[in-house]
Image: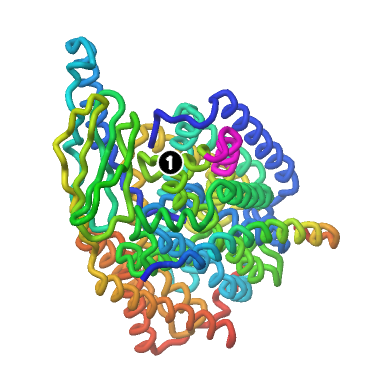
Amino acid sequence: MLDFARFPEKHAVARARSVLAFLAILITTIAPAAAFASPPTFSPDMALASDSGQVDVQWQADGEVTLTMSETSRGTKLVYKGTDSRIFLSGLRDGDYELRLAGEDGSLSEPVVVEVRPQSLSRALFLVLIGALVTLGIVIVVLRGARHG
Amino acid sequence: MTFSEGFLSVLIYGSLIWCGLSALGLAAMLIRDGKSGEIW
Amino acid sequence: MVESKVFLDPTLGWILLAAFSALWIGLGIYWGKRNKSFEDHALAGRNVGLALGTATAAATWITSNTTMLAPQFALQLGVWGMLAYSTAAFGLILFAPMAKRIRQLMPHGYTSGDFFRLRYGRVAWAIFLVFTLFYSLTWLVSMAMAGGILLEALAGIDYAWGMSVILAVCVIYTMRGGLAAVIGTDFIQSLVIIVGICVTGFAVLQNVSVSEIHANLTATKPALLDVLFPAAVMAIFNNLLFGLGEVFHNNVWWSRAFAFRDGVASKAFLMGGLVWLPIPVAAGFIALASGALGVAVPSADMVGPLVVAEVLGSAGAIAIFIVVFCSLASSIDSLLAATSDLVTEDIWRRLLHPSSSAESLKRTAQFVTLGLGVLTWLVCLPRIGTLATVLFFAGPLVGSMIWPIVTGLYWRSANTVGAVGAMLLGAGIGLYCYFSIGWYVATLIATAVSMVWTLGACGFAKGRFDWTVLKEAA
């Protein structure tokens, strides 16, 4: 069985990693202590629009971060707290989602807004209709053939 | 319109039980084939 | 991939890898002793029984994608994602009556290439060979790469080593044991996989109830429960037709139709499909539990191992390692065997050396298996990430072959113009749509176009095919 949903984003990840490594070196050599730690930032390679309700959130930060998400006209939710630099969100409905990172020292990132605009439902249902007809045709040819053959 | 909790339960438990039964079925079929000397 | 998280101690990973490798190679050598001729080697003596037949159909169709991608699908596309994945079982179920017909029409056949050559002539045969070799080789490469990547992520085994060991083990036992070794090991692998998935699934449910999963999804990932989630709904038939195209054309399945004993083929494919049907849901639902269990998922493709390791600790990591290794081996071995038989029968014997003896053909098939393994290894070694995406192009190619195959098996009016046009037009327009619209329409449109062309060509056809042509003696 084939896999057709896995589109590698190696380049983005590699770029993010090299930036991260660079920052890490910079920080350990130049900045003497966490007191001067820069606020967390979202990766510039992050896609900010989705037609499938999925967002691959990536960031750079020193130490632990808290990621919150607020949806238009709804409250703010805690999405993640920890030391990773990446999280995958899915199942988001139509809407604008504002994401914000907070560092250990309370420093805040610039927010980013992710726009989720699902694909057209009528087009999806039209594809289902064509698919059903083609499949039905195949089933009929095979089953009729099997009965008469 | 959303998939209900009941539907999700039936789907998940149904699949797991189905998997268990098919494993037993495969083993039973091999024993049956072995007894009649028809494995291959 | 999450390189930073390793689920299993590398030493334990190597021990498991070595133990299973030794088991498969030992069994391959043991079962290989039965094979005297090319027919024994390629088709296991045409006498495989129901239990092994059912298990091999299911096991070959369970790839590392089924066990690893089903959770990813569930996380991305929700309940429909799992259900859409399950529809791939219809490929096997619908192939059941076709397998019976294939055996009736071609009692001496070896490969799906034999069918295209005898039914539609050399031009259609050539197109088929290009399409099927593209599909088979990219599948093989993607599987071997996935093997290396997964072993590295699960147990910290270096990519190049993990990939090389999996490939080498499969090449050795397939070379020595032929289809018999593939089918025999498939039986053990299918049981290990199914039991592994079942135990893991119930263990996850010990830690979180369906009601908690449902409540968490409603609160945080509502679209995954949506019955009319567009991204998921529109992929359903594209996925189903992709599966039909894969099974209907590929020699992996045709060689099994020829290898199964009389009266067994049709039942074995039907039951194999039924065994496979629940697996995407049973293996995939654990991804839906990630939120309720508080598991943060850095990237969608590792959600399965993350949830299992969180719930079951190192026992879960061992289980997932074994299940993944078995699902990789059960597909790589089948592809190696079926593709080497296709090259041996269709290219070596039919095109180059028509007078080869049965013994020399068996040796040729063994060397071709080795050659395929080396080729795959060389392509996989540089670990080019974008290579896996090439596999997606195969959708329109395999979809465009569905109609020429089903009408060619059942309709005397099916003809060369229909088959050649359906494959070229279907694949061409499907690939165009892949780039201009999206992957989710490519296979669907390819199949629809080839259907219209095939039906038109059959409608206008004057000649009627003589079925006895397919009974060509070996």
Q: Which residues are magenta?
A: C311-325
Q: Residue furthest front?
A: A75
- The answer to which image quadrant residue C265 occupies is bottom right
Residue A140 position, x and y percent, is 48, 83
Q: Which residue is mark 1?
A: C295
Closer-to-camera residue (C156/C396) = C156
From what the image shows, is residue C468 above or below residue B13?
below
Closer-to-camera residue (A95/C425) = A95
The image quadrant where one finds the N terminus of chain C is: top left
Residue C328 position, x and y percent, is 53, 44
Q: Is residue C364 visible in the rendered structure shown here?
A: no
Q: Residue furthest right?
A: B35
Q: Does C319 lie within the magenta span?
A: yes
- Badge 1 crowding class, 10 Å Cα cut-off, few under 14, some 14 to 19, many 20 or more, is some
Q: Residue furthest left?
A: A110
From what the image shows, is residue C94 above or below residue C286?
below
The image quadrant where one finds the C terminus of chain C is: bottom right
Q: Is residue C68 visible in the rendered structure shown here?
A: yes
From what the image shows, is residue C149 above or below residue C43?
above
Closer-to-camera residue (C37/C319) = C319
Q: Residue at x 85, y 62 (%)?
A: B36
Residue C235 position, x and y percent, is 35, 64
Q: Does C211 lie within the magenta span?
A: no
Disc 1 chain ID: C
- The answer to which image quadrant residue C326 occupies is top right
Disc 1 element: loop
Q: Residue at x 75, y 48 (%)?
A: C34
Closer-to-camera residue (C337/B6) = B6
Residue C347 position, x and y percent, is 48, 54
